[in-house]
């Protein structure tokens, strides 16, 4: 821990407000929701910004009035208290006006939500299964199925070696998907509830054991997009990242063929994932055991 | 609002002071003693829960695992929430209710004094049990305070004890709520009509009904967890035809009103304090009462906004989104009323007022992020991230906790007969308000940028704001020692407080001497 | 000073109120449990959690809508600790609403001792769940497997023509849970 890190941290705070106004500041530390790489994520981002600005404006008006009053109507400036204490007209007004604002917010929100629920006519269906603590991806029509596990070495987590660029957000086998195709994603889990979330795709969906949920995405830009499990799922909840690699269709087909060839040679049975280390078995030293 | 026709309380020959020694506190049925016990218990829990928060923030100071094991980290997040919600915030409000409601409505004591004693004394046992689970094989609960199955069923030997502790807290809360309702409905002084009651009493009346309505539902939910684990039922077990998501519905049917249980009394406190220091009556008293009631009503219709991502049909998402957005209306009315109360007042800024103003601003910020979270499609991004953590800490720390601190400073001179150290109080305020913002504001950025909640380690792009947040946490946490010191010093001595204490204070409690005698209003005052 | 009669009136009023509030408490405790059947009904009506309806006994013949084709996808999942191999025999079928179809799921016990399992169905989108009817399903019963035993297990189903027109793909998922000794 160097002093410069602390200084950097505190300067980050002071510049935070400024950067927020400047919009999608893409510094080392992100401040805002990513705009994402799908039409849905763009809609969600726009919705988020709209509501945010409405809140900022309301906040400025309300707090402005309050601080103006705090400055002017103070006893030390000789203010004499008025005695008014009710007005039905005003009460009705400040009930109705917020209602109208809310309706204005609800319209775009409803539209976006309806689009998010439209899983029709997908080109590809991928089943995502949450395990304690890794993900399994199953390309249903292709018979390709594999686990995706955290690739960050323990030595980095335990601070023995320097942390890599994608610390905790790297996996051995990323989910490879084609760009420009509508992909339907089914989520479920094999033990406890997990939640599959890649911020750049604009949504997360819970993975519930015994039940199946669906969502969809259509990635427009090739790239690598990273996310994490978003529902507390036990000891290593923080260590089951998601990496989505979006590639052009041709490259995807090539990758798929390669995976199928690999699958032809028998690998470890997928029905029996690595021995689960039950939480109850691992003794926890109270008072802080250093890893 | 209301004024007492006659101010003082006469010493009757059968009047007696408190018993001496430990038995005074063990056996007391006096509302003031029990109020004090609740408040001291709450302060203790606040520091215990706060220490857990500091363990969490210390681990998150830097990326990598430094201090605790991830499983212990999960125990800390779980217990921090349970201790703060059920041990710190709720008992503090019950303590304030005990001290204040009888004095505000001109009642000699709570309606059911013996039950009052029981409802307090359950609490230390419940929390000793809960905290002792940390030392059991397999550790304490680590599945989050929301206790979602199937994860919570992986808890070790602590599991039945956690459930028992929650049952005990529930029983205590329900008894407290029954007592408060009985006191308010049956013991008001002549002339103290419902619409003359101080707003703190009103908000507590509504809160007490919420408690009675939802604490039993929580009890039911955790009982089902218990039978699923030990008696082979399948309420939440998919293999037996159950559904783990159903737990979330039942839990949040309790959980969302619970959120308002922790904020409505705060609204009441702020509605007492702002008029005093603005020297002007509360603006829109009646609309405040109606707004509180509508918030309470709506709180039963919005629970599934905590579960937008579990996979509900579109119609369900839309219903819960609209209902949740609607809550912004009565909440907004409250904020507007407070500001109108300040408008053209003659304000002074003693510590209680400072905390109240900070409450209005920072609670409203929490309200704004709440509105953002209500928007279901955007919530798919916010859900279970630090944005949510920032949101609910804004409404609970500079919201509920600031209101409790404000209340303590405001009524402490009445309770003890001594003025607290104003300079120290103001120092405490400034350190708290800076600390709390440095602590929680950056968490908005973390959440938006993609940091999930309840993780002990994080990717490098989150490092800066986590560090800032941790610095804020330690600043805020240690500043609270000033509060404890100030309170203790005020109990022990200090400048004599007048009966009215604050120039602008109105209400029956200010007509009593400071400190009030052990028994007050044994003869009901006449309220005009 | 309160008179004795006022005091006893008050005590009676308090008692009455306490009993009412306790009744409310008990009722709300009951309501917590009542939410279980309420939830099941809601799920059936709205498809809240994608649970399919139970067995359709003596199914009424339905008008077959040959003009409409719905894709049915079959998905097999294994809960942790279920040592099976489990897969649908076909990944998807094109079906006409109203007509019965049969397909199979294959399961094999990989363990060296007998195992009992229970398959739990789930349909996505949830909206389609109540329109998915089965007259025969291995999920209606516990399935017992000898060590190393493999089985072909049939499902006979049809899609109700009332299925909302916006639904074009229905996913039928089964999760196999081991139900003996391991609990659930």
Image (cartoon, coloured by chain):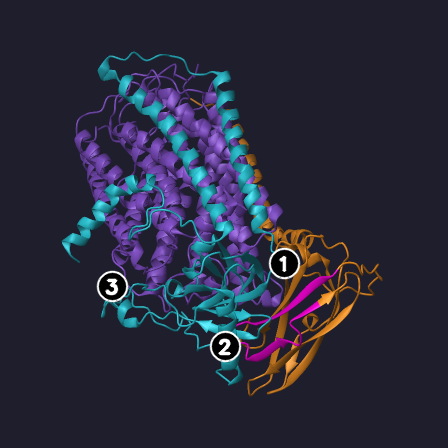
Chain colours: A cyan, B purple, C orange
The spot of residue C40 in percent (x, y) is 65, 55
Q: Secondary structure at mark 1?
A: loop
The answer to whether tags 3 and 1 share a subunit is no
Q: For the residues carrying marks 2 and 3, which lies nearer the camera in this image?
A: 2
> For the point 41% across and 67% down, which residue is it?
B157
Quarter holding the C terminus of chain B is: top left
**Closer-to-camera residue (B249/B178):** B249
- Residue with the mark numbered 1: A121
Q: Main secondary structure of the magenta part?
A: strand
Q: Could you confirm whether marks 2 and 3 are on the same chain?
A: no
**Chain under callout 3:** B
Going by the image, does A290 lie left or right of B509? left
The CA span between labels 1 and 2 is 25 Å
Relative to B507, say whether B42 is above or below: below
Write down the region rendered in magenta.
C69-93
Q: Is residue B281 magenta?
A: no
Give the label on residue B66, or none. 3
Can residue B438 be seen by looking at this rendering?
Answer: yes
Name the residue beneath numbered marker 2: A259
Q: Nearer the viewer, residue B452 or B476?
A: B452
* Crowd tier of the residue under label 2, counting other residues whose Cα lies within 10 Å: few below 14, some 14–19, many 20 or above: some
């Amino acid at each position: 821990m160097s002093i410069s890190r602390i200084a950097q941290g505190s300067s980050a705070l002071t510049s935070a407000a400024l950067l927020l106004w400047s919009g999608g500041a893409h510094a080392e530390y992100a401040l805002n929701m990513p705009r994402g790489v799908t039409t849905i994520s763009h809609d969600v981002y726009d919705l988020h910004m709209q509501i945010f600005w409405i809140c900022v404006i309301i906040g400025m008006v309300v707090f402005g009035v309050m601080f103006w009053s705090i400055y002017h109507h103070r006893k030390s400036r000789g203010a004499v208290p008025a005695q008014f204490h009710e007005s039905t007209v005003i009460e009705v007004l400040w009930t109705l006006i917020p209602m109208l604002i809310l309706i204005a917010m609800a319209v775009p929100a409803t539209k976006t939500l309806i689009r998010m629920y439209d899983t029709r006519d997908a080109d590809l269906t991928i089943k995502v299964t949450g395990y304690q603590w890794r993900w399994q991806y199953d390309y249903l029509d292709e018979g390709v199925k594999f686990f995706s596990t955290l690739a960050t070495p323990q030595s980095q987590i335990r601070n023995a070696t320097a942390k890599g660029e994608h610390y905790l957000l790297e996996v051995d086998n990323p989910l490879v998907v084609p760009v420009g195709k509508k992909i339907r994603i089914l989520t479920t889990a094999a033990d406890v509830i997990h939640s599959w979330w890649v911020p750049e795709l604009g949504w997360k969906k819970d993975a519930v054991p015994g039940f199946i949920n669906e969502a969809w995405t259509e990635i427009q830009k090739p790239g690598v997009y990273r996310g994490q499990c978003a529902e507390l799922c036990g000891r290593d909840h923080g260590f089951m990242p998601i990496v989505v690699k979006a590639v052009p269709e041709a490259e995807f087909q090539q990758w798929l063929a390669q995976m199928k060839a690999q699958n032809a040679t028998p690998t470890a049975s997928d029905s029996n994932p690595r021995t689960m280390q039950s939480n109850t078995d691992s003794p926890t030293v109270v008072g802080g055991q250093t890893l | 609002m209301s004024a007492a026709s006659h101010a003082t309380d006469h010493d009757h020959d059968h009047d007696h002071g408190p018993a001496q020694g430990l038995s005074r506190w063990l056996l007391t049925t006096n509302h003031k003693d029990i109020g004090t016990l609740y408040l001291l218990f709450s302060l203790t829990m606040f520091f215990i829960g706060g220490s857990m928060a500091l363990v969490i923030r210390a681990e998150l100071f830097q990326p990598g695992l430094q201090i605790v094991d991830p499983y212990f980290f999960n125990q800390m997040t779980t217990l921090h929430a349970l201790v703060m919600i059920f041990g710190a915030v709720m008992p503090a409000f019950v303590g304030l209710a005990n001290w204040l409601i009888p004095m505000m409505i001109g009642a000699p004591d709570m309606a059911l004094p013996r039950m009052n004693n029981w409802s307090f004394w359950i609490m230390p046992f419940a929390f000793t049990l809960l905290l002792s689970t940390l030392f059991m094989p397999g550790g304490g609960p680590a599945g989050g305070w929301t206790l979602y199955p199937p994860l919570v069923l992986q808890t070790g030997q602590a599991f039945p004890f956690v459930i028992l502790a929650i049952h005990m807290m529930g029983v205590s809360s329900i008894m407290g709520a029954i007592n408060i309702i009985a006191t308010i409905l049956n013991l008001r002084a002549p002339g103290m009509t419902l619409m003359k009651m101080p707003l703190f009493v009103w908000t507590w009346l509504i809160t007490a009904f919420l408690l009675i309505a939802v604490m039993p539902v929580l009890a039911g939910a955790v009982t089902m967890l218990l039978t699923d684990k030990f008696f082979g039922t399948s309420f939440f077990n998919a293999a037996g035809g159950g559904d783990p998501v159903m737990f979330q519905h039942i839990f949040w049917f309790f959980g969302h009103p619970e959120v308002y249980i922790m904020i409505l009394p705060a609204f009441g406190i702020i509605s007492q304090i702002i008029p005093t220091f603005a020297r002007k009556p509360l603006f829109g008293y009646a609309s405040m009462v109606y707004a509180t009631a509508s918030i309470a009503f709506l709180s039963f219709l919005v629970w599934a906004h905590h579960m937008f991502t579990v996979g509900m049909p579109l119609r369900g998402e839309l219903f819960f989104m609209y209902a949740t957005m609607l809550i912004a209306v009565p909440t907004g009315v409250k904020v507007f009323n407070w500001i109108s109360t300040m408008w053209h007042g003659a304000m002074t800024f003693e510590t209680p007022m400072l905390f109240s103003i900070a409450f209005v601003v920072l609670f409203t910020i929490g309200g704004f992020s709440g509105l953002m979270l209500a928007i279901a499609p955007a919530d798919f991004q916010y859900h279970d991230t630090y944005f949510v953590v920032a949101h609910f800490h804004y409404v609970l720390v500079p919201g509920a906790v600031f209101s409790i601190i404000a209340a303590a400073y405001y009524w402490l001179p009445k309770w003890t007969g001594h003025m607290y150290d104003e300079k120290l109080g103001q120092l405490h305020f400034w350190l708290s308000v800076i600390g709390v913002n440095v602590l929680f504001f950056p968490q908005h950025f973390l959440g938006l940028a993609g940091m999930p909640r309840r993780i002990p380690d994080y990717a490098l792009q989150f490092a800066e704001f986590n560090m800032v947040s941790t610095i804020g946490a330690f600043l805020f946490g240690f500043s609270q020692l000033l509060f404890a010191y100030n309170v203790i010093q005020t109990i022990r001595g200090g400048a004599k407080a007048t009966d009215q204490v604050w120039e602008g204070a109105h209400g029956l409690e200010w007509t009593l001497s400071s400190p009030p005698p052990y028994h007050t209003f044994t003869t009901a005052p006449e309220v005009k | 000073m309160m008179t004795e009669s006022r005091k006893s009136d008050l005590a009676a009023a308090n008692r009455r109120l306490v009993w009412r509030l306790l009744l409310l408490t008990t009722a709300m405790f009951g309501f917590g449990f009542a939410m279980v059947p309420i939830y099941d009904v809601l799920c059936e009506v709205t498809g809240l959690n994608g649970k399919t309806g139970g067995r359709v006994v003596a199914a009424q013949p339905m008008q077959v809508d040959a003009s409409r084709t719905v894709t049915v996808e079959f998905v097999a999942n294994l809960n942790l600790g279920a040592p099976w191999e489990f897969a649908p025999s076909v990944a998807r079928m094109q079906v006409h609403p109203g007509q019965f179809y049969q397909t199979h799921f294959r399961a094999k016990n990989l363990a060296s001792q007998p195992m009992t399992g229970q398959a739990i169905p789930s349909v996505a989108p949830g909206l389609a769940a109540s329109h998915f009817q089965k007259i025969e399903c291995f999920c209606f019963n516990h399935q017992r497997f000898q060590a190393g035993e493999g089985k072909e297990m049939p499902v006979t189903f049809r899609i109700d023509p009332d299925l909302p027109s916006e639904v074009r793909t229905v996913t039928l998922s089964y999760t196999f849970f081991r139900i003996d000794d391991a609990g659930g």
